[in-house]
Amino acid sequence: MRSSTAQASTYASTETVAIPLRRHWTDRIADYVEISKPRISFFVLISVAAGFLLGGSGEFQVWTLANALLGIALVATGSSALNQYYERDTDARMERTLSRPIPSGRLSAGEVLTMGLVSGIVGCVYLALFVNLLTAALAAATYLAYTLIYTPLKRISTVNTAVGAVPGALPPVLGWTAAGGSLDFNAFMMFSILYLWQFPHFMAIAWLYRDDYRRAGLKMIPAVEDRKQVTGFVAVGYALALLPVSLLPGQMGLAGDIYFVVALVFGVIYLWTAVRFCKTESVRTARQLLLASLAYLPAVWLAMVGEHLHLLN
Ligand code: HEM
Ligand SMILES: CC(C)=CCC/C(C)=C/CC/C(C)=C/COP(=O)(O)OP(=O)(O)O
């Protein structure tokens, strides 16, 4: 125990962290919640719910949905905890992540490692017992791909984004199989939409935090690429590819005309913000692209589910 006053900037050199002797239990809970990356996890769970509501046979199984959400939330929390355990040194070098529980000394690395293993394993076992084996196996694959492949790859190659986008795109598939759906073309369409969506989303973020990533030695495209507009072209390319792919569910009978219009309108806005970002890389255009990404996903899932369940027509 080196000190009881954890001042984030003091610990920027990684291992030196202070664990306060006594902290109120509500503060510890808040730290555990922060470890779970609650905003990303919330979107992951929205995607699970969308997959579930589209993959079911028509009969609404509320308890299976609740069990799937709980089990997947535990697995997602476990993967976030292991990611932060592994990245405790690089997180301490980035302004965005410096005040996370480990680099700021509010939680020990050992605690977070334990949380990552326990939460991940309990979540997978819970899914196997209360949902089904296929969903448990896919959730375990998501957890392992995120922690053992994507996370270490961030230090090695810019390919990391294309790899991390695979576990990132699996949540709707987990929901789909939790509802009893098989791994068919419709599940693959939902996977593809979320896979492509992640690139403009992350190019905006990676550009905004490129100095952070450079300082930490993480290989993100805008942090290693000196030529202007490469990040923008990646964003535009994927936003463009997303447009026709996102219209497929309307064509394949998973959703109808309302979905088609919503996917088209939000897809065009997403593409337009990506083009603006590509033309003029700036904090303003990057933030607009990030905002468009965060509006796109709930809108598209909601329209698909709403129309599939005849709530909109
Ligand atoms: C390659 C895949 C992805 C990468 C590298 C990535 C990276 C990030 C990062 C670094 C942030 C933090 C930005 C900040 O602190 O300001 C973030 C925010 C976010 N991400 Fe992603 N993400 C990916 C995929 C996803 C997926 C699959 C989802 C949801 C299904 C998602 C949903 C969100 C949300 C909701 C936020 C919160 C924005 C906010 O703080 O307001 N991301 N992402
Ligand atoms: C069921 C289950 C395990 C779901 C999880 C799905 C999943 C992997 C979502 C996150 C996608 C992703 C690569 C986020 C960025 O992490 P980052 O490490 O780049 O972000 P950071 O820099 O903020 O730590």
Image (cartoon, rainbow, N blue to C red):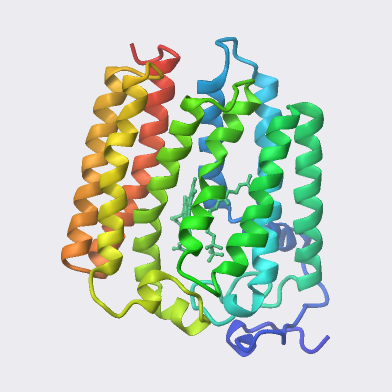
The picture quadrant where one finds residue 99 is: bottom right
Say which of 173 and 68 sits in front. Answer: 173
- Residue 35 shows in this picture: no
Q: Is residue 229 visible?
A: yes
The mark tally for this picture is: 0
Spot occupied by residue 211 in the image (x, y as percentages of width and height): 40, 80
Q: Residue at horizontal 76%, vertical 72%?
A: 109
**Horizontal side, residue 220 vs residue 121: left or right:** left
Q: Quadrant of the C terminus?
A: top left
Is 303 rendered above or below residue 224?
above
Residue found 62% across the figure and 69% down from its top: 152
Give how far across and how far down residue 310 sits, in percent: 40, 11
| Residue 117 in which image quadrant | bottom right
Image quadrant for the N terminus? bottom right
- As drawn, 39 above or below 157: above
User: What residue appears at the point 75 percent right and 64 percent down from the top-left corner?
Assistant: 112
Q: Position of residue 229 (x, y in %)?
A: 23, 69
In the image, residue 149 lies at what x, y percent?
Answer: 62, 61
The image quadrant that residue 174 belongs to is top right
Q: Is residue 134 above or below residue 199?
A: above
Describe residue 36's horizontal placement relative to residue 94 as left or right: right
Q: Is 166 situated left or right of 245 in this image?
A: right
Task: Give the residue at x 31% y 24%.
Answer: 259
Does residue 184 lie above or below 214 as drawn?
Answer: above
Give the camera-side residue of 29 and 48. 48
